[in-house]
Image (cartoon, grey):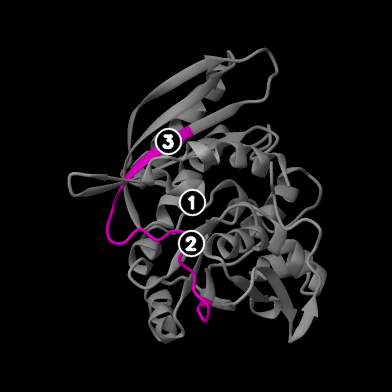
Amino acid sequence: MSQEARFLKMLQPLARNPAARGFLDDTAVLELDGTTLVITHDMIAENVHFVPTDPPQDVAWKLVTVNLSDLAAKGTRPIGAMMGYSLQNEGDWDQQFVEGLRKALDAFGLALLGGDTVSLPFNAPRCLGLTVFGVATGPVPSRTGARVGDHLWVTGSIGDAHAGLRIARGEREGPTQLLERYRNPRPRMEAGQRLVHIVTAMMDVSDGLLLDGSRMADASGVRAVIELETVPLSDAYLQFAGDDRGARLSAMRAGDDYELLFTASPDAATGILALGEELGIPVSRIGRMEEGSGLHLLDRGTDVPLPPNLGYEH
């Protein structure tokens, strides 16, 4: 069990309010006088979620969009945010960050409502946090609703951002599209708002498709079966990493995709594919939910052992 999982287990008894959803989800869902308020909080840390050479504008964009991705998975309309910011006596970096923050807030109609700052010791890694508030536009799906017989789906493509991180670190050269996917994720806001009326469970893919699929299966009390050959990879990723089993498993273990992972009845397939075409977003069926527990992998019908590490855990 990871340190993150152990700490969450310690916190579990404190999830006394129904809005906390037992800490089994990425958001809190608070009912207030007929309005459903959805709240999320994400942090990003230097050398973990971004590298020191990333442009400050892109760091700001990422801080906003990784939080909005959680709201996208709940079909929520964002309304406001509060930020925690670490100061390090670098006025130029701060100015560029604010410019990127303004761009991100304007792009998604999000108001900055307040927050807090803290000074860090010299050369300490930056650590930034954002709490985002949204209003539900329909049902608010959780990770816990997947049922036996449901199909498992994902939007977009998988693995691009981690390949982009390798490029940003100077480990390899590669297509600029991959670097862009790492530095400038695009939350699937409209897709999430449309899908909430169709799905049985939904979350975003932030820590890796395998790990997040396993989390959804565990929360729902079912087994997730993923078919490797159906997992969508972009042309840029295939050019960068290839299309063998190792390259596919690497993509599925990588984080920072910020795509939507969801389950739905087989009867919903036609509507899901039509919605993807309407929005111009690839939507791929990658598996199914069965009786049992955990995660099972297939490659063209052949069982594939699970890798020892399913994704990114703190």
Residue at image mark 3: 131
The disc placed on residue 218 is: none
Q: Judge by depth and name the residue closer to the eye, 159 or 265.
A: 265
Residue density around tag 1, few if under 14, some if 14–19, many if 20 or more, within 10 Å: many
Mark 3 element type: strand
Q: Give the vertical position of 120 relative to 234 (above or below).
A: above
Q: Which residue does the image show at 58% across and 52% down from the upper left?
A: 206
Estimate the spatial distance between the alpha carbons at disc 2 and disc 1, rounded to whole Å: 8 Å
Mark 2 vs mark 3: give the one in front. Answer: 2
Mark 1 vs mark 3: give the one in front. Answer: 1
Q: Which residues are magenta?
A: 130-151
Counting residues from the start of the chain, the first of labels 1 and 3 encountered is 1
Quadrant in the rendering for residue 49: top right
Q: Which residue does the image show at 72% across and 70% down from the upper left?
A: 238
Three-letter residue code for mark 1: Asp
Mark 2 element type: loop
Percent position of residue 115, x then y: 40, 24
In reply to whether residue 134 is colored magenta, the answer given is yes
Does residue 7 appear left or right of residue 116 in this picture?
Answer: right
Residue at image mark 1: 25
Residue at image mark 2: 144
Estimate the spatial distance between the alpha carbons at disc 2 and disc 3, rounded to whole Å: 23 Å
Percent position of residue 271, x then y: 38, 82
Mark 1 element type: loop
Q: Which residue does the image show at 52% across and 64% down from the upper left?
A: 220
